[in-house]
Image (spheres, rainbow, N blue to C red):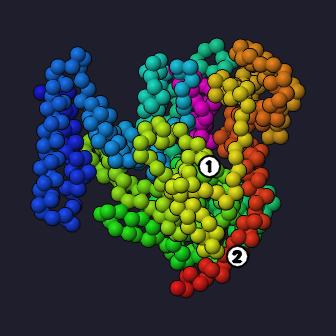
Amino acid sequence: MTSRKRRYLFVVPLVLVVCALLGGLLGGSAASAAAADDAEAAVQENLRSLTKVYSAIEQNFANPVDPEKAIYQGAIQGMLRTLDPHSNFVDPKTYQLLREERRGRYYGVGMQVGPRDGKVLVIVPFVGSPAHQAGLRPGDTIVRVNDTSTEGLSTTEVVTLLKGPKGTKVRVFVKREGKDQPLEFEIVRDEIPRFSIEHAYEIRPGIGYIQISTFMETTSRELAASLRKLNPKNLKGLILDLRSNPGGLLNEAVSVSDMFLPKGQVVVSQRGRAAGERVYRATRGNGGVEYPLVVLIDRRSASASEIVAGALQDHDRALVAGETSFGKGLVQNEYPLSENSGLLLTVARYYTPSGRLIQRNFEGLSLYGYYFQRGEGSNGNGNRQIRMTDTGRTVYGGGGITPDEKISPAKLTPFMRTLEFRHFAFFGFAQFYLASRDTIPRDFQVDGAVLAEFRRYLDREKVEYTEDDLQENLETIRQRIRQDLFVSVFGKIEGDRAGIESDPQITIAIELLPRAKELAANARRPVAQQVER
């Protein structure tokens, strides 16, 4: 039997398992026996039709058929797309990456890589990682890993080559700006931790700043450590930045909310056809330690980050600022399948403490339209739920978390968009500038001499510009040059911090702390009454 035939025999039973899950055949004890028999008969009949169709395709299609592609990307995904945008079949490679992200660690060399002009470049080595200690830099072009050329390989394929068991060696060959010959680095792989909180510090005297990038198994532990470092009893205010946080684990969102709410308060509830209703409450609570809190969100804040923002907003514990969030209020359960694949199936909807369903409408939308073609006004007043916070403030559901204070992100001019996204000019200039020097000082500023070097770089790369273009965007250009140079010399965390400290949304959030203080003070009495009931 050929390998292709064996794979085909594997994926057909896999489809049966998925069909059974979707049809309620696994664990559907509440259904009558007759209904279950009818459902099973329908699934079996449809599966036979699918098998016949696949057999005809395999035997007669003009080109050889890859069964995994036909089933994984075709039959199963097509079936799930009829349900909702978030139910998904995960192939073995993606499933492995998903588990690594949730655990917050993997084994490899510790750097982010990405595509540029058909090549795979080092975007940034993680500070302290084997790649960083070996001397790899942002902008290095990976040309070979061990004896395998990277020409024609995708980013995912190069990442696979770099990963491996802890303690094993890998040789990485790179081309670097200013060097005639490729450089060779021998790196010993190690466990690479991933952190959901990279930034937690006093952004102003007595004012803390914490950025949570995702919700994984370690998030609540990281937050507890970050709060201890900031010493909440002495805080005059805290900015909790959930912008561009796509979500993650529900239990971690509950644990994070728990640290800011009094014990006993509802964080979130979920309701599903099979599981009924489940209510999650703050079990430990904030111990009575309260300080003004502003939560920043944007249109890419989703799922678990919306649970946190919604809970703190409904209980008037925080002033929520920024843009209306994404609007994902569906809960997925994970069903491991054979061959290290998995099914993420929507089993419930979640509701904020005031009863808001955050999920926005997806009927009649393509996946692209659902994820990428959403304007700020797409939630629409006609389909919005109206609820009340603990103190009687109006909040809305049915389309993401609406902020208490709208703060639009700074918009890039057409020239800046060209520099950033067409030419990757600041990333490239950092390598150009550092090719003739080893480092920059911590107090580095972008002066006239640096700007002259930037003009030379733009000329070399044949980037069209006028002096008016540069003058119109001068402060943004200075900030972006400094940020990317800091990433290259001092690491991603320091580079990001340079950007955070000049972020106008964060500046406004700090100015909103007095309003957040007033909000929390007004909420204390209603909160006490609710907990007693």
According to the image, label 2 marks what residue?
522
Say which mark, if any, is on residue 280. none
Residue drawn at the location 22% of the way across and 61% of the way down:
27
Viewer-side residue, 165 vs 325: 325
Amino acid type indicated by mark 2: Asn
Total numbered labels: 2
Examine the image and state in which quarter residue 273 appears: bottom left
Measured as percent of width and height from the top left, residue 349 is found at: 41, 60
According to the image, label 1 marks what residue?
298
Whether 330 is drawn above or below 281: the answer is above
Amino acid type indicated by mark 1: Asp
Measured as percent of width and height from the top left, residue 494 is found at: 70, 43
Residue drawn at the location 65% of the way across and 40% of the way down:
492
Look at the image and give the residue range highlighted in magenta.
120-143
Q: Residue furthest right?
A: 448
Residue drawn at the location 31% of the way across and 52% of the way down:
335
Q: Residue furthest bottom?
A: 532
Viewer-side residue, 249 vs 226: 249
Secondary element at image label 1: loop
Asked if one can make out residue 76 in the rendered structure from this viewpoint, the answer is yes
Residue drawn at the location 60% of the way across and 52% of the way down:
324
Asked if one can make out residue 3 in the rendered structure from this viewpoint, the answer is no
Examine the image and state in which quarter residue 209 appears: bottom right
- Asked whether the residues under the numbered discs 1 and 2 touch, taking CB atoms below 8 Å apart as contact, a structural biologist would say no
Distance from disc 1 to disc 2, alpha carbons, whole Å, reads: 26 Å
The N terminus is located in which quarter? top left
Residue 449 lies within the magenta run: no
Whether 524 is drawn above or below 338: the answer is below
Measured as percent of width and height from the top left, residue 84 is found at: 38, 47
Secondary element at image label 2: helix
Few, some or many C-alpha atoms within 10 Å of disc 1 (few <14, some 14-19, many ≥20)? many
